[in-house]
Amino acid sequence: MNKYHAYLQLIRMDKPIGAFLLLWPTLWALWLAANSRPEPDIIVIFIIGTFLMRAAGCVINDYADRNFDRHVERTHMRPLVTGEVSIKEAFLLFGVLLLLAFLLVLLLNDLTIKLSFFGVFIAALYPFVKRVSHLPQMVLGIAFSWGIPMSYTAVTQSLPHEAWLVFAANFCWIVAYDTQYAMVDRDDDLRIGVKSTAILFGKWDITIVGLLQLTTLLLMAWLGWQKGFSWHYYLGLALACVFALYQQYLCRNRSKEGCFKAFLNNNWFGAMVFFGIVLAVPGSS
């Protein structure tokens, strides 16, 4: 039972926030691509695939960071640091998760299958970027946004310009919330030599996070204007804006607790955007 619990910790089943942050934009894309009527089987494939890929990403991230995590207050008890899970066991688990995710992708069309290979590559690359660049959040932005083009190809077998507009909006949102996350560990990261946008932005961190969130909302509003959405859609964006403002309040003193609460609050930001899409896309109930 202890080993089973350690595996669950390794894949963050006890902390599902990352899976939800990966899932929301995927659902945005599915509903937008299918005019609010995605096929149930495609929804199930992407939901399960999202949780599998997030779990696999956690495993490879903890492997890459195992020698750093022991020096960080928030991560020093992770299973690969304590030895509850061995390196061999972690790689075996990583392989099983990728295999299961790939089996799901095989149920989709050829273009979506081809896109999935890049998704795996960028997800595996992310944990190693923080050693050489202050921009790992941007790599995560690509990795966590890759479900968007895959959603469009799964539904339409094409990549219309709106897919890349949603991609760009989501990319900005991810860089914003992962910067908030990095602000929690900034002191530890400076001490051990790990790089992040929280360190790069310095005293401008909160301002830049706010501008990135604003860019996300403006890009999504532009999408709504292009598609002729009703006011319900903009209500969702307005509610997301309220949560973004609340996050600015939480981060005002740059306390670890406040920044982490702001990061967690992004679950509601993503949910409100989805709420607006479901209500406003032509053909929605």
Image: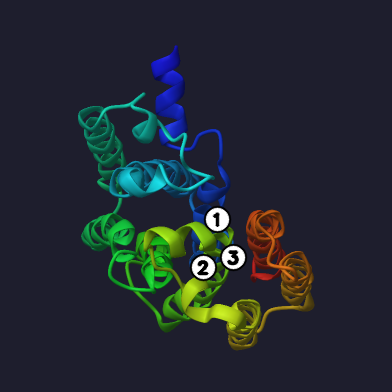
Residue located 74% across and 78% down the image: 230
Q: Nearer the viewer, residue 156 or 274?
A: 274
Mark 3, residue position: 180
In the picture, measured across the screen, residue 246 lies left or right of residue 224, that is right
Q: Which mark is residue 174?
A: 2
User: In which quadrant will I find the N terminus?
Assistant: top left
What SS does tag 1 mark?
helix
Cβ atoms under marks 2 and 1 closer than 8 Å: yes
What number of labels is visible?
Answer: 3
Report if residue 112 is visible in the image: no
Residue type at mark 1 is Leu
Classify mark 1: residues with Cα within 10 Å, few (<14), some (14-19) or many (20+).
many
Q: Is residue 159 above or below residue 101?
A: below
Mark 1, residue position: 21
In the picture, measured across the screen, residue 74 lies left or right of residue 275, that is left
Mark 3 or 2: in front is 3
Cβ atoms under marks 3 and 1 closer than 8 Å: no
Classify mark 2: residues with Cα within 10 Å, few (<14), some (14-19) or many (20+).
many
Residue 161, quarter of picture: bottom left
Name the N-terminal-most of marks 2 and 1: 1
User: In which quadrant will I find the C terminus?
Assistant: bottom right
